[in-house]
Image: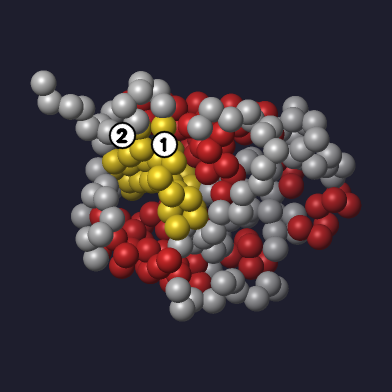
Amino acid sequence: MSQELPTRLLLIRHGESEVTVKQIIGGDQSCTGLSVLGRQQAEALGRRWAEGHEPKVDALWSSTLPRAYQTAELLAASLGDLKVQMHPDLVERRPGQADGVSFSEFTDQFEWTGDVHPYVPLAPGGESQSDFFHRTGKALYKLVHSNPGTTMMVVCHGGVIDVAMRVLLGLAPAAPFLLWTLNTSITEFLTTDKIGVWRLVRYNDSSHLSGLPTHTDYE
C-alpha cells in the first residue's frame, strides 16, 4: 500500500506595503499595495523558487488585500504560472473605523486595551482578537483539510501566520509569545504520521532578502 503524501503549508507574509511606509492602519479601504521595496522583496522570493531548490507548489492562495495579492501575482510565474486564488478570510485583522488612521493617532481616537480583553474590537466595526482568531483559524483549517496531500502556498499577513502557529501547533489563543514575521519570509508546516498533527519545518526564513534594505524610511 502506497503511503499518502504529506500535506505541506507554505505561509508567505506579503512584501513591504505602502501603508507601512505611511505608518497607517491598512484595511480594505486604505491598503494600496506594495512599496517599491515590497516589490523587490517579492521578486527576490520568486527568484529563490525559480532556482528549483524549494518545494513544488500545487496551489497558490492569497488574502484579498492588495499588499498580499500583488505579492502573490509577482510570485506566480516562478511557481509555474499558477492561478492566484483569492480568499477573503485570510486578510489581516479587520480594523473597522481605524482603517486608514495613522499609528500615532490611533490611541488618541480609540480606547484600545492592547488585547488584554480578547472580545473587545480593535475599533468600532472592527474585529476583536477572538473574532480574528476564529475567522482565520477556521479558514486555514478548511483549506488544509480540503486539499490533503498537496503543497499549498498562502500569501497572507503577520497576524494570520501568528494564528497558524497557535492553531496548527495546538497552542492557546492567548499563549504568551510574540512573533515578528518578516516581509516575504517563509513559514512552513508539514503533516506528520499522526492524523491531525503538524510539524513546524521553518519560521521566518528570509535568506533571499540578503542585500536589500530592511525597510523603507517611514514618511
Q: Which residue is mark 1?
A: 199
Q: Is residue 20 above or below residue 210?
A: above
Label 2 CA crowd tier, 10 Å (few <14, some 14–19, many 20+): some
Asked whether the viewer can see residue 39, the reply is no
Element type where label 1 sits in the image:
strand
Foreground pick, 30 / 132 = 132
**Quadrant location of the C terminus?**
bottom right
Q: Type of residue at label 1?
A: Arg
Q: CA distance from mark 2 to mark 1?
A: 11 Å
Residue at 80% x, 42% y is: 114
**Quadrant location of the N terminus?**
top left
Residue at 63% x, 41% y is: 93
Element type where label 2 sits in the image:
loop
Q: Is residue 152 above or below residue 72?
A: above
Task: Please tell me whether mark 2 or mark 1 is closer to you in this view.
Answer: 1
Query: What is the x, y in percent for residue 165?
Result: 53, 38
Q: Type of residue at label 2?
A: Thr
Q: Which mark is residue 7?
A: 2
Callout 2 touching callout 1 (CB < 8 Å): no
Q: Quick check: 196 left or right of 101?
A: left
Query: What is the x, y in percent for residue 175?
Result: 67, 34
